Image (cartoon, grey):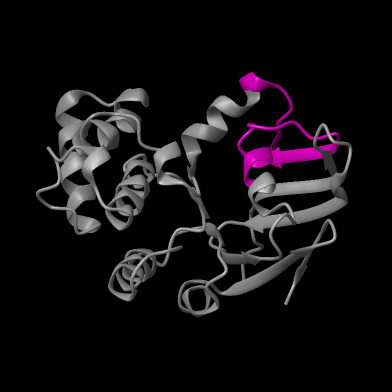
Amino acid sequence: MNEKINLIKINHLSFSYSSGQPVFSNMNFNFAKGQRVGLVGPNGSGKTTLFHLIMGLLNPTEGKIEIFGKERKEEKDFTEVRERIGLVFQDPDDQLFSPTVAEDISFGPLNLGKNHQETKRILEKTLKILGLDGFENRMTHNLSYGEKRLVSLATVWAMQPEILLLDEPVVWLDEKTIGRVEQILNRNQNLSYIIISHDKKFLKNTTDNIYLMENGEIKKI
């Protein structure tokens, strides 16, 4: 059996907000290609903070973050990370900023250098995969919360990332929409992702392992 390729390696990570209260202290965590991981823990335990550190939106107090085989420290180090890792924010309104669904989904591929013809093909394929056919010209601010959640996932999916970081992707969604998200994730067994969620049933249906974040540590449960 081939040795697992670690895509994310976090070594002795410490982080504190300006209040001075430590969120992490000397934390270690590895994430390998092909893993489908659930992340649970009390509110305020640092789950979202971890995602933001991986994406370079926050800077650690101490420790080392290695992603795709390279240590990431400065802002320029995270340009590649943001092209290869897709973060779906907890609040879809933090993700969606264009007037229409098509513009929001097309933004990522265009930003990655795809031409308009390629982007149109990606848009159509993404809409079909996520069951959003006919949404192209819908105004994002008029969408329901569940529709916004799916479109925010679509904006990341369209960039064809190597890793997905999903922050509470099914919170406040109805059972039918949760089932759709489960189908989307399970349809491609080659996906690598970490999901933060309080929905244990959803995690059971979409992940292989679940980790608990508590008291500044991550441990498998």
Q: Quadrant of the C terminus?
A: bottom right
Please tell me which residue is depicted at 47% across the width and 72% down the height of the picture. Answer: 206
The answer to whether residue 68 shows anywhere in this view is: no
Q: How many marks?
A: 0
In this view of the protein, can residue 39 be seen by the observer?
yes
The structure residue drawn at horizontal position 63% and vertical position 57%, both measured from the top left corner, is 32
Q: Is residue 172 above or below residue 51?
A: below
Residue extent of the magenta highlight: 51-76
Q: Is residue 17 left or right of residue 202?
A: right
Side of 168 relative to 8 (left or right) = left
User: Toward the viewer: 6 or 60?
Assistant: 60
Pick whichever, 130 or 3, lies toward us. Answer: 130
Q: Quadrant of the N terminus?
A: bottom right
| Horizontal and vertical percent position of residue 141 | 26, 38
| Residue 65 falls within the magenta-colored stretch | yes
Q: Does the magenta run of residues contain 71?
A: yes
Residue 213 picture location, percent across and down:
74, 63
Give the vertical position of 50 relative to 77 (above or below): below
Residue at 42% x, 64% y is 172
Give how far across and how far down residue 170 sits, in percent.
43, 63
Q: Quadrant of residue 196?
A: bottom right
